[in-house]
């Protein structure tokens, strides 16, 4: 067993505590039926709409949970995060709630809607490189220079506990769900949902979904330890860390029933179908789970299935391209 897989796991109690702290802060997002999807896959399907969450993604859950537990001295120093976009906005929103100075490091390729969103929430936005490694390095330098507290995007117990509240809400709304599909970037959302669901409903499958061009978690699980991959790019910009976290890997190994890969074309098609059929704007990262179902990358075999839609921060121009059929994933 790798050192990462042997790390202490977050408890279900920590998820319950996070849910209590998030009451009145995070939106309890709806679990919507998707009859069109159910007909396509031959099983009842529902959509967990974190695209309707505050700041447009699930990230506020973990960011707020961690910041709520900082000391007054830590808050006075300010926080910094490195992110492709959604975590940056979640941290910026939580920092504004606590009146904490906030800096976020985003890639130079970050969608403008995400960069502008973080800035509008009061964050000082610094752009650096194109990979998670480059923005992490810059954030660590700034944290050392200014004394900022780093709020990680995924590899922290408080972040995992906060993201796990998505799973808590799913089981509260649909106790007899049989499978939950979760997008995986760094793995915080899948880790949190996995640990909660397996503690309360172990028969329910929890399956991660990654772009085939950014499959760090799948390759890590195959290798038995976290591995760093060569970035190839993906339209799912929120699912492109080049390495999973040690802690998120340990949770994935303990709680996930597998990770499937989906193509760029399948992701783009799924985003379009969600807009046209469910009237939901879902960014490409958030559409990965629906892509797994529509493409057959994962087959429910009759199981009652939830697809987690992790975010909805898509550039308006991209929305028009997807709806008009002019967007190309190539």
Image: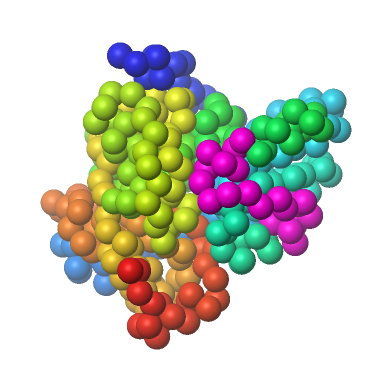
* Residue 195 shows up from this direction: no
In-image side of 45 versus 128 (left or right): left
Q: Is residue 249 left or right of residue 26?
A: left
Percent across and percent down for residue 168 are: 46, 40
- Say which residue appears at 52% left-offset and 31% top-offset: 155
Quick one: 69 or 320, which is closer to the camera?
320
Q: How many marks?
A: 0
Q: Residue at x 45, y 65 (%)?
A: 282
Front residue of 310/32: it is 310
Near-viewer residue (200 or 117): 117
Check the image and tell me how it is coloured.
rainbow
Q: Is 298 rendered above or below residue 281?
A: above
Judge whether residue 129 is colored magenta. Answer: yes
Residue in the picture at 35% in, 74% down: 328
Q: Split into 4 quadrants, where in the image is the N terminus?
A: top left
* In the rendered image, the vertical position of residue 217 relative to residue 313, given as above or below: above
The stretch in magenta equals 118-137
Quarter of the image that includes the C terminus: bottom left
User: Is residue 146 one of those drawn in magenta?
Assistant: no
Q: Position of residue 94 (x, y in %)?
A: 71, 45
Q: Position of residue 267 (x, y in %)?
A: 33, 63
Residue 3: x %, y % from top left = 40, 14
Q: Residue at x 29, y 38 (%)?
A: 218
Q: Residue furthest bottom?
A: 324
């Amino acid at each position: 067993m790798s050192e990462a897989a042997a790390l202490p796991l977050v408890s279900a109690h920590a998820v319950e505590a996070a849910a209590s702290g998030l009451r009145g802060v995070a939106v309890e997002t709806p679990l919507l039926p998707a009859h069109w999807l159910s007909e396509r896959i031959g099983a009842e399907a529902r959509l967990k709409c974190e695209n309707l969450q505050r700041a447009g993604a699930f990230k506020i859950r973990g960011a707020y949970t961690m910041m709520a537990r900082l000391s007054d001295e830590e808050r006075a120093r300010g926080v910094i995060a490195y992110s492709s976009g959604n975590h940056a906005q979640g941290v910026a929103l939580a920092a504004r709630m606590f009146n904490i100075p906030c800096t976020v490091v985003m890639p130079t390729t970050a969608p403008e809607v995400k960069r502008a969103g973080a800035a509008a929430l009061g964050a000082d936005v610094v752009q650096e490189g194109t990979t998670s490694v480059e923005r992490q390095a810059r954030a660590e330098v700034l944290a050392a220079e200014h004394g900022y507290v780093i709020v990680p995007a995924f590899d922290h117990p408080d972040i995992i506990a906060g993201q796990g509240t998505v799973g808590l809400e799913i089981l509260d709304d649909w106790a007899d769900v049989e499978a939950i599909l979760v997008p995986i970037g760094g793995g915080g959302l899948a880790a949190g949902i996995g640990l909660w669901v397996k503690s309360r409903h172990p028969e329910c499958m929890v399956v991660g979904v990654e772009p085939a061009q950014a499959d760090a978690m799948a390759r890590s699980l195959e290798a038995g330890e976290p591995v760093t991959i060569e970035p190839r790019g993906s339209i799912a910009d929120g699912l492109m860390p080049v390495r999973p976290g040690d802690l998120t890997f340990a949770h994935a190994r303990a709680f996930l029933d597998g990770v499937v890969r989906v193509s760029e074309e399948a992701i783009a098609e799924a985003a379009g179908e969600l807009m046209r059929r469910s009237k939901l704007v879902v960014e490409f990262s958030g559409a990965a789970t629906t892509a797994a179902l529509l493409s057959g990358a994962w087959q429910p075999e009759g199981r009652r299935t939830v697809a987690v839609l992790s975010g909805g921060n898509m550039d308006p121009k991209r929305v028009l391209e997807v709806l008009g059929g002019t967007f190309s994933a190539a």
